[in-house]
Image (cartoon, rainbow, N blue to C red):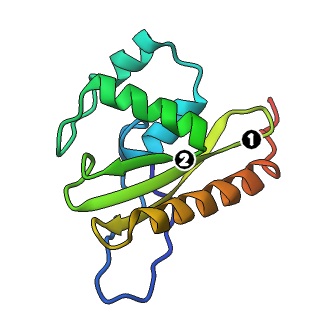
Amino acid sequence: MVLVGFAEGSSQMRIHMSVGSRLPILMGAVGRAIAARLDLNEEELREEFMKLRWQTPISFEEYLEQVRQAKLNGYGFDQGHFSPGVTTVATAIVDDAGVVRYGLSGIMFAGQHDAETIKLIARDLADLSNWSSARLVSPPIR
């Protein structure tokens, strides 16, 4: 996956990634959200998971459960595995054919928000992703 844009808050302290930064597609919270939308069986997911390099390691069983939770909740969650000290919630945006086209993430410092506020942020992201998905048309076949 490639970062194509971002928005920042007004706080003096920020977490920043540069436009064009590349990450493995199943990495972090957005990776869990994307994995929840892909039609991968457990073996395929395990194979892809084994290619990931985490800052704070996570077991495949934990990751699999978090992907299942992302499918139920409509958003992925990462607390310090992608990057220590960072909490991320994310969603996948799909086109009208159900193909994942984008990810949308809310990235914050660990401890910056309580659990209830993080859930509210995640639900807002899920609502925005659902709104976007309902309007995104798949590219024409050439």
Image spot of residue 42 (x, y percent): 44, 13
What is the CA distance from the residue labelled 1 to the residue labelled 2? 17 Å
Mark 2: few/some/many CA within 10 Å (<14, 14-19, 20+): many
Identify the residue at horizontal 41%, vertical 62% (top origin).
115
SS type, badge 2: loop
Quarter of the figure that contains the C terminus: top right
Report x, y in % for residue 63: 35, 31
Nearest to N terminus: mark 1 or mark 2: 2
Q: Which of 72 and 51 is in front in this view?
A: 72
51, 118: nearer the viewer: 118
Q: Tell me residue 44's x, y (percent).
A: 43, 14
* Quarter location, residue 9: bottom left
Q: Give the residue number, with chain letter if any, for mark 2.
A: 75
Direction top: furthest residue: 43
- 107 relative position to 133: left or right: left
Q: Is residue 1 visible?
A: no
| x and y percentages locating residue 77 in the rendered image | 42, 48
Vertical side of 36 occupied by 110: above or below: below
Amino acid carrying label 1: it is Asp
Residue 101 or 36: which is nearer the viewer?
36
Q: Which residue is drawn at 42% across and 19% down?
A: 45
Q: In this view, does 40 lie above or below 116?
A: above
For the residue marked with disc 2, what is the amino acid?
Tyr
What residue sits right under mark 1 in the picture?
95
Dot 1 lies on which element?
loop
User: Does 9 sit above or below residue 22?
Assistant: below
Q: What residue appears at the point 28 percent right and 83 percent down from the top-left corner?
A: 13
